[in-house]
């Protein structure tokens, strides 16, 4: 198992928490110097807040853990490609690297705007892609029944 797969597995565990709570199953962890400094999953239904995405929760947790508003030298792992809002927050927080599982064809930032991220941010896509995609598919299939 690679480092990216290891941390994406932790993000998937967060996504399963969201799934179990009836939230869209997206999970996120932020890693700095081989330590998880922030984690989160979607809480939009529970908090009645459309901005309560997994990435936003993890960014807030990481800034509190590190005591800094910028997350340079951190890697954000998220199960689904970030939306434009989250990409903007990732950019503002100056996260160095983003790793995501499966793409979001409808709302993903790469289709709409790559410039939201910090210019030096490196993006890696497709880590544990199948596992991330299947979880999303299962969730939405369960809602259609």
Image: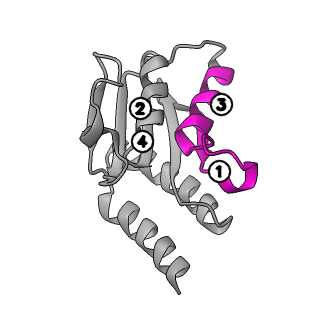
Q: Are marks 4 and 1 in contact (CB under 8 Å)?
A: no
What is the crowding at mark 1: few (fewer than 14 residues within 10 Å), some, or many (at least 20)?
some
Magenta segment: 38-65
What is the number of the mark on residue 83? 4
**Element marked by disc 2:** helix
Q: Are marks 2 and 1 in contact (CB under 8 Å)?
A: no
Inter-mark Cα distance, 4 to 3: 19 Å
- Specify the farthest residue to the bottom: 145
Residue bearing mark 3: 61
Residue sitting nearer the eye, 38 or 44 = 44
Q: Residue at x 65, y 30 (%)?
A: 61
Q: Relative to residue 28, is residue 70 depicted above or below? A: above
Inter-mark Cα distance, 4 to 1: 14 Å
Q: Are marks 4 and 2 in contact (CB under 8 Å)?
A: yes
Q: Relative to residue 127, is residue 98 depicted above or below? A: above
- Give the mark nearer the N terminus: 3 vs 2: 3
Q: Residue at x 51, y 72 (%)?
A: 139
Residue bearing mark 2: 87
- Give the mark nearer the N terminus: 2 vs 1: 1
- Give the mark nearer the N terminus: 4 vs 3: 3
**Element marked by disc 1:** helix
Inter-mark Cα distance, 1 to 3: 16 Å
Q: Residue at x 50, y 81 (%)?
A: 144
Residue bearing mark 1: 44
């Amino acid at each position: 198992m690679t480092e990216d797969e290891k941390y994406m597995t932790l993000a998937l565990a967060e996504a399963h928490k969201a799934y179990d709570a009836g939230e869209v199953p997206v999970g996120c962890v932020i890693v700095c110097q081989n330590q998880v400094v922030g984690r989160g999953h979607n809480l939009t239904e529970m908090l009645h807040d459309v901005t309560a995405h997994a990435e936003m929760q993890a960014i807030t947790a990481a800034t509190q853990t590190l005591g800094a508003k910028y997350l340079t030298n951190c890697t954000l792992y998220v199960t689904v490609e970030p939306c434009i809002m989250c990409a903007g927050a990732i950019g503002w927080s100056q996260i160095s690297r983003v790793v995501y599982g499966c793409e979001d064809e409808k709302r993903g930032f790469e289709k709409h705007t790559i410039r939201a991220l910090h210019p030096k941010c490196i993006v890696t896509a497709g880590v544990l892609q199948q596992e991330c995609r299947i979880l999303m598919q299962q969730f939405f299939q369960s809602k259609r029944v």
